[in-house]
Image (cartoon, rainbow, N blue to C red):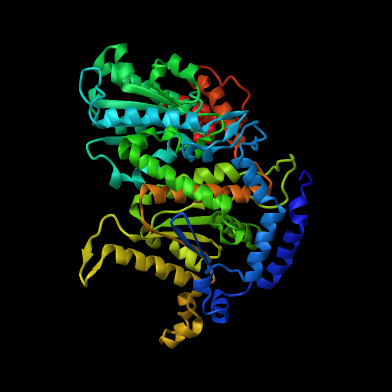
């Protein structure tokens, strides 16, 4: 598809364009009135997740056309190529096999003629042995004390996944271990995270696929200095530092014994790596069995994605519904609204997963797209968001499709008066919000309440705001794995439809290169050496004068 107009010229796209003209003003109130069982019909289940997509501005015809678009853009063939280890990351010449990270022992996934599944399980076994010894207090620090604190140093995919999953699964974590995550090159991050930790009882995991990332290398160097300031002997590094990386040379040069390095492979993208050795901090927290459960949940969703018919395929449905709003209604953002405090970092995690994957405007064939691609992803856990930004979702001028995520059972049951629980209150809000967003409140209904007609327009809710509701029994490692894999594959489906490569990230390079050039200029005295623009020169000059 090197012709930039190829996607928008496909029969399914053209049919959707015509269909959109007919559908754009159709109200969810009318769709539900015409089909009272719509809410029982438009749902799908997979890997322990229940998706209600009835509150979307679609008819059966819309869904048929959207699935035709998935077929015409080759989503199924592209999925199968990914799962088979083909080098679909064409701009980097790499296979894309995060699914192999959760393949069961005994499966075969070939990369360049080698079955990588045994390699995956060999690393998992080493991680488990290490995690067991730390958790049992058998891995001793340099002065003979057991490890009580784990500090993961990494950024982007080497941080967001582990921190999100640690927060999500804190309930299952070993309580006598303290976990901290340092990512920002701002020294405040490291300073505050280690301030109350005893270096003698602290293990630092340096997590970096490349082991060259400026932020991580700076933080790792400073963490080593912090450790040595207390322990005074280079030999302490081997007991207190381990690495997760694909770059053994750089790990060795940093001074970490490569016997204490846990590897992964170039076919694992950074933002798809939390279930590789990058999840070591999580495994330390929840234990090898919990981590295996997480992998089983990922795998269950992988299997659902691979085998379920498109009509009942959760990632496909969520993917095509996203395309409907993004490319036809012109929605620019998607809100992720988990109703579970443990998922407080979930939307931040999905920001990288989705925006670093599909924030592209050049097709696989090298042409500039003439259509929109990846949306802005944002969100906060409910109910807090309701008291912050939901006003705009309900009554603002922007159409913001939302994903609501909730659970049948909480991990922290807590009664409230009236025989109910905090969790009942929480879930009542999920159902109330999606109902209010879909159906709103008409002017007639407002006036019928006796509201002053002059004020009534302010009280009207147009409704017709689309939502998905994702429900599961309880937040377990297995369900978390399925949930993450669902979004991984949703991103894949959309990238496949948009004909872009979700697996590179050239867009982060330019800033990195320029920062690398400016760093030495901040250390030198005279005028900025390089020919920046006048704004950048003035900013550098201002900073050098003021910081003195
Ligand atoms: O694991 P590394 O190599 O330190 O990279 C960290 C992050 O930097 C990026 O390359 C760019 O932000 C991400 O894709 C990656 O997750």
Q: Residue at x 40, y 65 (%)?
A: 430
How many marks do you count on the picture? 0
Snapshot quadrant of residue 389: bottom left
Front position in the image: 434 or 252: 252
Q: Position of residue 475 (x, y in %)?
A: 36, 53
Which corner quadrant holds the N terminus? Answer: top right
Instruction: Say which quadrant the C terminus sits in.
Output: top left
Q: Residue at x 40, y 70 (%)?
A: 432
> Which of the pair 522/177 is nearer the observer?
177
Q: Quadrant of residue 408?
A: bottom left
Vertical placement of residue 464 versus 218, above or below: below
Q: Please provide percent x and percent y for residue 491.
A: 57, 48
Where is residue 224? Give x, y as percent: 34, 20
Comparing 197 with 390, the one in front is 197
Q: Looking at this view, is 264 or 168 the one in front? A: 264
Q: Examine the rendering and report whether any part of residue 548 can be seen.
A: no
């Amino acid at each position: 598809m090197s012709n930039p107009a190829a996607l928008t010229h496909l029969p399914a796209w053209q049919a959707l364009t015509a269909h959109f003209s007919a559908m754009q003003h159709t109200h969810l109130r009318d769709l539900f009135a015409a089909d009272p069982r719509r809410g029982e019909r438009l749902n799908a289940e997979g890997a322990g997740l229940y998706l209600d997509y009835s509150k979307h501005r679609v008819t059966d015809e819309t869904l048929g056309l959207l699935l035709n678009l998935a077929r015409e853009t080759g989503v199924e063939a592209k999925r199968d190529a990914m799962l088979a280890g083909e080098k679909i990351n064409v701009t980097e010449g790499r296979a894309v096999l995060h699914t192999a990270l959760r393949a069961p022992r005994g499966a075969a996934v070939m990369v360049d003629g080698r079955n990588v599944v045994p390699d995956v399980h060999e690393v998992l076994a080493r991680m488990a042995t290490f995690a067991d010894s730390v958790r049992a207090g058998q891995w001793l620090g340099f002065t003979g004390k057991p490890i009580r604190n784990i500090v993961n140093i990494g950024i982007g995919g080497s941080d967001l996944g582990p921190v999100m999953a640690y927060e999500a699964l804190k309930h299952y974590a070993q309580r006598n271990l303290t976990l901290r995550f340092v990512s920002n090159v701002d020294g405040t991050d490291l300073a505050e995270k280690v301030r109350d930790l005893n270096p003698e009882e602290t293990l630092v995991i340096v997590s970096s696929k490349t082991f060259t990332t400026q932020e991580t290398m700076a933080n790792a160097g400073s963490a080593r200095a912090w450790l040595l300031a207390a322990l005074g002997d280079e030999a302490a590094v081997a007991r207190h530092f381990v690495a997760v990386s694909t770059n053994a040379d750089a790990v060795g040069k940093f001074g970490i014994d490569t016997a204490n390095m846990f590897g992964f492979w170039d076919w694992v993208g950074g933002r798809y790596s939390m279930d590789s050795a990058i999840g070591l901090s999580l495994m330390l927290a929840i234990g090898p069995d919990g981590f295996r459960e997480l992998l089983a949940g990922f795998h269950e969703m992988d299997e659902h994605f691979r085998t379920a018919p498109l009509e009942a395929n959760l990632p496909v449905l969520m993917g095509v519904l996203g395309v409907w709003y993004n490319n036809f209604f012109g929605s620019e953002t998607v809100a992720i609204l988990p109703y579970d405090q443990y998922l407080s970092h979930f939307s931040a995690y999905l920001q990288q997963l989705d925006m670093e994957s599909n924030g592209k405007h050049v097709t696989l064939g090298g042409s500039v797209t003439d259509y929109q691609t990846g949306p802005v992803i944002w969100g906060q856990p409910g109910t807090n968001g309701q008291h912050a930004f939901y006003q705009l979702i309900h009554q603002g001028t922007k159409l913001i499709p939302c994903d609501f995520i909730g659970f049948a059972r909480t991990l922290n049951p807590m009664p409230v008066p009236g025989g109910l629980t905090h969790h009942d209150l929480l879930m009542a809000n999920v159902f109330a919000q999606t109902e209010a967003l879909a159906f709103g409140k008409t002017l007639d209904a407002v006036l019928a309440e006796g509201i002053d007609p002059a004020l009534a327009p302010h009280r009207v809710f147009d409704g017709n705001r689309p939502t998905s509701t994702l429900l599961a029994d309880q937040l377990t490692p297995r369900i978390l794995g399925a949930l993450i894999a669902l979004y991984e594959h949703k991103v894949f489906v959309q990238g496949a439809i948009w004909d872009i490569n979700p697996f590179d990230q050239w867009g982060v390079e330019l800033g990195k290169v320029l920062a690398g050039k400016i760093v030495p200029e901040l250390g030198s005295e005279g005028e900025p050496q390089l020919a920046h623009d006048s704004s950048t020169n003035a900013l550098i000059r201002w900073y050098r004068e003021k910081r003195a």
